[in-house]
Amino acid sequence: MNSKVCIALDFDSTAKVVEFLDSFPGGEKLLVKIGMEVFYGQGLEIIKTVKSYGHDIFLDLKLYDIPNTVKSAMSQLAKLDVDIVNVHASGSIAMMKAAIEGLEEGKIKDKRPLCIAVTCLTSLSQEVLNKELLIDRTIDETVLQFAKNAKEAGLDGVVCSPLESKLIHDNLGLDFLTVTPGVRLKDDSIDDQQRVTTPSDARVLTSSYIVVGRPITRAKDPYATYKKIVREFEGE
């Protein structure tokens, strides 16, 4: 990957994405996240546009459906030349295995995109988990079980809070990736997140990659903020 810090391109138009990317020095190769907002609004063209810059893409669509549908969908996503895709771990081991099968069938290069599974959204609290979703385990227990299921299914890693990253790596090994949103600089607002850390804390907690959106995209100087986060996460 071009970077261990993934920038979430949460914009509502291709023009805004281009404006943001053009604010970075030429030749700087990034890892960026294309999520639902911009993908559903702009379609496949946004992937072509971002790839024209030479950036790696995490296509964050969080597939969740019956195994056969997920397999078919992943076969199509594998043809888009993206680098990471994801599913919801709560969809079952069978669904996650089907996702890998679809990626293998649809890949256009020798190597399929990495596939990771969302465990518990970083906007979820323990109270929501217990009272609304009727899951009577702790967040740590739930996330770890979902991670174990993902590894059994053959996935490359999971999406989790940095707070759960070390727990996962202690149990499943450092080669099993943890991609962690919910990362903010010390003085940033946490917005709608619940389980958050700073970039330096995420490094200590063994996050493989961190995903940062608004603290970078809404900064007065996005590039300077990005480089600051990279330095903190990489421990420079």
Image: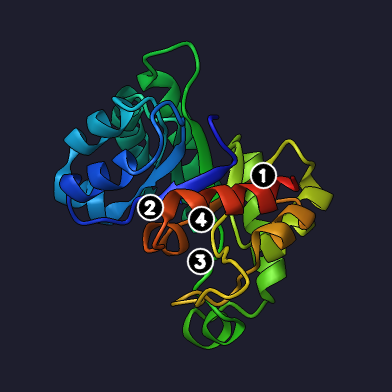
User: Along the polypeptide, which appears first: circle 1 or circle 3?
Assistant: 3
Disc 1 to disc 3, C-alpha distance = 17 Å
* Vertical side of 125 occupied by 21: above or below: above
Mark-to-mark CA distance, 4 and 1: 20 Å
What is the quadrant of the C terminus in the image? top right
- Look at mark 4 in the image and give the residue it sits on: 225
The 10 Å Cα crowd at callout 1, few under 14, some 14 to 19, many 20 or more, is: many
Q: Which residue is the site of mark 3?
A: 121
Horizontal side, residue 152 vs residue 99: left or right:
right
Q: Tell me which residue sits at (29%, 53%) in the image.
A: 36
x, y percent for residue 206: 75, 51
Task: Give the labeled residue for mark 2.
Answer: 64
* Residue 160 in the image, given as x and y percentages of width and height: 60, 58
Dot 2 or dot 3: first in sequence order is 2
What amino acid is found at the position of numbered circle 2 in the picture? Tyr
Q: Amino acid at mark 4?
A: Thr
Mark 3 or 4: in front is: 4
Lower position in the chain sequence, tag 4 or tag 1: 1
Q: What residue did someone put label 1 on?
A: 208
